[in-house]
Image (spheres, helix red, strand yellow):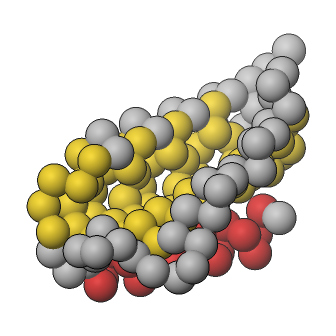
Amino acid sequence: MGQRDGFGILILGDGAKYRGHFKQGLFSGLGVINFPDGSKYEGDFSQGNFQGYGTFYRHDGMRYEGEFKDGSMHGLGLVSFPDGSHGLPRNEGYFEREHLVRREKCGRSLQRARDVSRTARDQCS
């Protein structure tokens, strides 16, 4: 049996559901994954991980839009909370392994993440 390539749907053992592109059997390209706890990621994947630009929606309403590396928030991005706030001071800037390490404006990366998320949602939902 061959490896998945191209567009497909996969339901994982834990109940997570992936809709998107595969390359050599791994999530690769644009995709959307819904987790059993209500969390969701829309965006770029590479070698099975969140990689590139996208949006992660946590089950409690927190949202991160920005860059990802190896499945983690890593690069320029913005955290938003359920009430629409971004924290005080604003949680926008450069993240490393899920932690904000430097505050800075990230308008271009934020717009790219939103565009990629919208495209993934439109193509894969």
Q: Position of residue 55 (x, y in %)?
A: 54, 64
Q: Position of residue 102 (x, y in %)?
A: 13, 61
Q: Residue at x 34, y 45 (%)?
A: 98
Above or below 3: residue 55: below
**Quadrant holding the N terminus:** top right
Q: Nearer the viewer, residue 1 or 28?
A: 28
One can see residue 112 in this view = no
Q: Count the numbered circles shown.
A: 0
Compared across the picture, whether 85 is left or right of 1 comes to left
One can see residue 77 in this view = yes
Compared across the picture, whether 111 is left or right of 62 comes to left
Q: Residue at x 21, y 60 (%)?
A: 94
Compared across the picture, whether 124 is left or right of 45 comes to right
Q: Position of residue 110 (x, y in %)?
A: 38, 77
Q: Residue at x 28, y 47 (%)?
A: 99
Q: Residue at x 35, y 72 (%)?
A: 87
**Quadrant holding the C terminus:** bottom right
Above or below 26: residue 65: below
Compared across the picture, whether 16 is left or right of 109 comes to right
Q: Position of residue 78 (x, y in %)?
A: 37, 70
Name of the residue lying farthest toward the top: 1
Above or below 31: residue 76: below
Q: Nearer the viewer, residue 80 or 52?
A: 80
